[in-house]
Image (tube, rainbow, N blue to C red):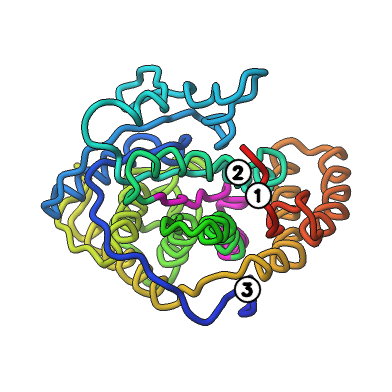
Amino acid sequence: MIEAPAQVYQAAAPRLAPHVPRRLFVSGHSLTNHPFPEYLEGIAADLGWPLEWNMQGLVGSSVKDRSMGNGPAPWTGYAAGIDKAGHPLDVRAELQRPGPSYDTLIITEQHTVLGSIVWNDSLRLLRDFHDRVIALDPQARTYLFAAWMNVLDLDDPARWIAYERAAAPIWRCMAERINHDLAAAGRPDRLTTIPAASALATLVEEATSSRPIPGLEGPDAKSILAAIFRDDVHLRPAGVYYVALVTTAILHGRPVDVTVRPRGMRQDTAERLRQIATTFVADYARGERPLTVEACRSYVSEDFVPTYLAYQRDLQWRDHGSAMTWLKWAKLRLLWPRLFRRHDATNPFYVGKPAPL
């Protein structure tokens, strides 16, 4: 198993007060698309906390696609994507519509997260999205949803599990990099991470262990994963329900006890998924330690770049098989460690004067 070294973390962390979302906006791609928000709504209703929500969904998109955009005119990406009903949506107009402001933003990046950080200006554009929500409600919360990579080998998910655990600190490092600048500006607002990817890795590990999950059993790993995934990355209802349980607990800052379950799901299946989610969130809360931007820079350059690039290389080779895949890997394997060690603004994790938006 690959884990983040202890030096990535600091000793103590201020915690945000518990938060009960009332009006939620989700900006994402297929991994946060239907029925994920509906499951969040159903769980919230079961807890007695009605949740209103809308979304900006754009399949395969980066934060850049959903904010800055890719054309010559800036910020056209905020008008990209569709809302919960499948209609075109202008996010800037939606955030400023009459009535109560959104008090919660869930936003995700592409699962090829390191590439998005380097090539798509993720950190600056995440900050812009966050600032727009906070400008309308200073008490609002932003949550960075950690998206998971494709499972490289459905017959043996061990490498995927190890990869997601190695990737987990990167999502937190993204939030911490932005939080560093918010703190430097004297602002109390912060970004928090929803560890969806590492939570899902825990579910897969449990499901393929010697203690199978009722309703998700199978003779081998591939058949078990077929009950959680509908391909190598998108989830079936059991997986979505589990991720929604974890997400709700993170949003509320405490364990949640619910009885609602997806239509057609066995009660014993739902109960076991709730147990795994509850244990994961409790373990995550106990082990959560704040990150330093400096240690993040070291972890990315020394540990995560090789892990990320090797996984991406083998995933692309599996799908396409080309010498160009290996040439790209070799080039980035040389360049990216140097990039993330740099002490200037070309390094996304360098702590210096923030670039103007």
Marks 1/2: CA–CA distance: 9 Å
Q: Is residue 266 magenta?
A: no
Where's residue 324, x and y in %? 86, 38
Graded by Cα atoms within 10 Å as few (under 14), some (14 to 19) or many (20 or more), the crowding at tag 1 reads few
User: What's under tag 3, amino acid-wise?
Assistant: Val
In the image, 279 versus 50, the foreground residue is 50
Q: Amino acid at mark 2?
A: Arg
Please provide percent x and percent y for residue 176: 55, 61
Q: Residues within 10 Å of mark 2 (few under 14, many from 20)?
A: many
- Hey, which quadrant is residue 7 in on the image? bottom right
Write down the quadrant of residue 194 in the picture.
bottom left
Disc 2 to disc 3, C-alpha distance: 22 Å
Please, which residue is most extreme toward the bottom here? 11
**Tag 3: Cα neighbours inside 10 Å, few (<14), some, or many (≥20)?**
many
Q: Are marks 1 and 3 in contact (CB under 8 Å)?
A: no
Q: Position of residue 74 (x, y in %)?
A: 60, 24
Whether pointer 1 and pointer 2 mark residues with C-beta atoms closer than 8 Å, the reply is yes
Is residue 204 rendered to the left or right of residue 304?
left
Q: What residue is disc 1 on? A: 354
Residue 8 marker:
3
Q: Residue furthest front?
A: 186
Q: Is residue 31 above or below residue 61?
A: below
Mark 3 element type: helix
Quadrant of the frame with the C terminus = top right
Asked whether, in this view, residue 26 is left or right of residue 316, the answer is left
| Closer-to-camera residue (96/328) | 96
